[in-house]
Image (cartoon, helix red, strand yellow):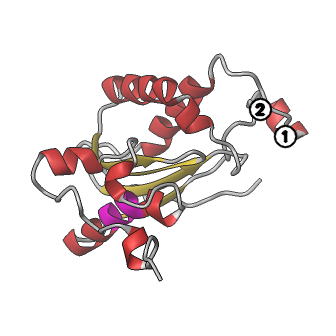
Amino acid sequence: MSRYRRILVPGATYFFTVALADRKSCLLVEEIDRLRKAYGGVHRSLPFTTIAVAVLPDHIHAVWKLPEGDADYSLRWSRIKAEFSRGLPAVERGLSKQQRREKGIWQRRFWEHQIRDEVDLERHIDYIHYNPVKHGLVSRVSDWPHSSFHRYVSAGWLSVDWAGDVREAVGFGERA
């Protein structure tokens, strides 16, 4: 069995990518209320600060600040995944996932990166907010509803037209 070494620094800030096993799925946005309930329930029982988040059809990007003295982000993601999956039908899965009683909805592992400084934090927040445009889901960041971008606009930290409109950048809609 592989042993992955994770950086565990109590109270640190981390960037995460958590993905579904089926990268063509739209389950996360189709079941956004279920995901919000799972995320909120874990947040209440194992507190953390969500600095930025975007939920895309098949993956989630987030930046979390963990409480002082706490570095257990793996437990939090494990519980979010389990709560979200509870009640959903299992998908076809291999023997390994069957033996571990996993439903096969999620990729077993996730990506984490410890934020090093303010520049690194800003870069990851921008990446999260722009990700729906990068994946071609919308042409403007403000058009994606499942993102902390709207909280940033409400707080006055970003303008509603931040990053512009990708259609204007590539000349869509121009007349010959």
Question: Alpha-carbon neighbours of circle 2 within 10 Å: few (<14), some, or many (≥20)?
Answer: few
Foreground residue among 38 and 76: 38
Where, by quadrant of the figure, is residue 42 drawn? top left
* Secondary element at image label 2: loop
Foreground residue among 165 and 13: 165
Q: Where is residue 111 in the image (x, y as percent from the top left)?
A: 53, 58
* Secondary element at image label 1: helix
Q: Which residue: 86% across, 34% down?
A: 92
Residue type at mark 2 is Arg
Q: Which residue: 38% across, 77% down?
A: 169
Where, by quadrant of the figure, is residue 91 drawn? top right
Residue annotated with mark 1:
96
Q: Where is residue 21 in the image (x, y as percent from the top left)?
A: 71, 46
Residue 33 disc label: none
Where, by quadrant of the figure, is residue 96 drawn? top right
What secondary structure is the stretch in magenta mostly built from?
helix
The answer to whether residue 127 is magenta is yes
Toward the top, the furthest residue is: 87
Q: Which residue: 20% across, 69% down?
A: 118
Magenta-highlighted residues: 124-130
Give the alpha-carbon distance from disc 1 to disc 2, as whole Å. 6 Å
Tell me if 156 is positioned left or right of 131 in this view: left
Q: Do the residues labelled 1 and 2 touch (CB within 8 Å)?
A: yes
Tell me if 104 is positioned left or right of 38 in this view: right
Residue type at mark 1 is Ser
Foreground residue among 170 and 48: 170
Q: Which residue: 54% across, 24% down?
A: 83
Residue annotated with mark 2:
100
